[in-house]
Image: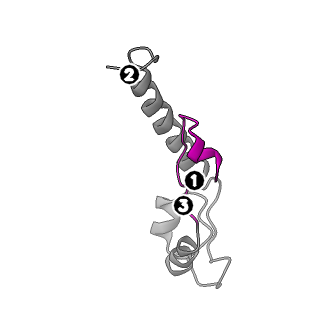
Amino acid sequence: MAGGWSRDGAVQDQIDASVEDAVALARSHLSEGESFTHCEECGCAIPEKRRTAIPGIHLCIQCQAESEKHKVGTSGINRRGSKDSQLR
């Protein structure tokens, strides 16, 4: 049930589009190619099981964890275009 001037299913379309965008963003961050045998940050050997499980990996577990601590998450997308979203 849609409210106001929107058509039926408009809310679900917004949810579906948000999910598709999130999946595309996650896929864009996946590594590709051949994995490194040694970490590009610290030089430690990367175990073969990790290289096999995650193609294109360049960091050891410790350096990867440290790298992820410093990443900034997205705040999401306001598809309504409300005034509050335009003030940020």
Residues tagged 1 and 3 counted as in contact (Cβ below 8 A): no
Type of amino acid under label 2? Gly
- Whether residue 76 appears in magenta in the rendering, the answer is yes
Q: Is residue 48 above or below residue 75?
A: below
In terms of depth relative to the viewer, which is nearer, 22 or 44?
22
Please provide percent x and percent y for residue 63: 56, 79
Q: Is residue 32 left or right of residue 62?
A: right
Secondary element at tag 2: loop
Please provide percent x and percent y for residue 85: 59, 46
In terms of depth relative to the viewer, which is nearer, 34 or 7?
7
Q: How is the image coloured?
A: one colour
In the image, which residues are magenta? 72-88
Front disc: 1 or 2: 2
Please provide percent x and percent y for residue 6: 46, 18
Q: Pointer 1: residues within 10 angstroms few (<14), some, or many (20+)?
A: few
Give the residue drawn at x 50%, y 70%: 48
* Disc with the residue nearer the chain's start (2 vs 3): 2
Give the residue drawn at x 37%, y 20%: 2
Q: CA distance from mark 2 to mark 3?
A: 31 Å
* Disc with the residue nearer the chain's start (1 vs 2): 2
In terms of depth relative to the viewer, which is nearer, 82 or 29?
82
Secondary element at tag 1: loop
Type of amino acid under label 1? Leu
Residue position marked by numbered label 2 in the rendering: 3
In terms of depth relative to the viewer, which is nearer, 62 or 10?
10
Residue position marked by numbered label 1 in the rendering: 30
Give the residue drawn at x 39%, y 19%: 9
Tag of residue 73: 3
